[in-house]
Image: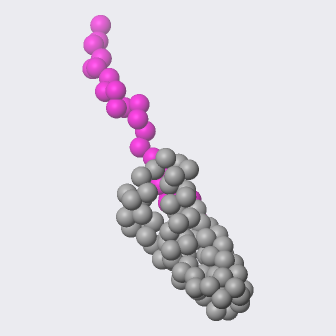
Amino acid sequence: MMIEPARDPNDDILEPSLRELQEEEMSASFKFASAEFALAHEAADVSRAFGQAGLPFDPRTFVGLRVLESCVAENLDPVVSLRLPTIRELIDRSAELAASLVASRV
């Protein structure tokens, strides 16, 4: 009779393949890009409305407030979230895109 070695419980945990990791990264990138463009279009629309009403408007603050709103809805700490580099990049990129959209009148 042969005795088998004890099974390592970690053997059941499969490492994701390179393909799976790439797909996850592409999915996350797509989601961020989609969010950036959606926020930019919304900020551009609000910017035009404020401009027609003669009111100053800051797209970066607007996008930051939309992120804050999402944090509240998801029960996330807004300060921690707003300090994350990826969220800061999302806010900055969305504000830049909004300014471009307003300037090009798209």
Whether residue 17 appears in magenta in the rendering, the answer is yes
Residue 82 appears at what percent x and percent y?
Answer: 42, 63
- Looking at this view, is 53 or 40 the one in front? 53
Which residue reaches farthest front? 54
Left or right of 39 in this view: 1: left
At 50% from the left and 74% from the top, the residue drawn is 61
Q: Residue furthest bottom?
A: 103
In percent of width and height, residue 86 lies at 43, 66
Identify whether 26 is placed above or below 46. above
Question: Residue 7's x, y, as percent?
Answer: 32, 23
Relative to 20, say whether 54 is above or below: below
Is residue 24 in view?
no
Q: Nearer the viewer, residue 12 or 5?
A: 12
Query: Residue 30 occupies which quadrant of the picture?
Result: bottom right
Q: How many marks?
A: 0
Q: Quadrant of residue 56?
A: bottom right
In reply to whether residue 86 is colored magenta, the answer given is: no
From this view, report whether residue 35 is shown above or below residue 7: below
Q: Residue at x 52, y 63 (%)?
A: 67
Quadrant of the rendering where the N terminus is positioned: top left
| Residue 32, quarter of picture | bottom right
Left or right of residue 102, residue 32 in this image: left
- Magenta residue span: 1-30
Q: Nearer the viewer, residue 42 or 5?
A: 42
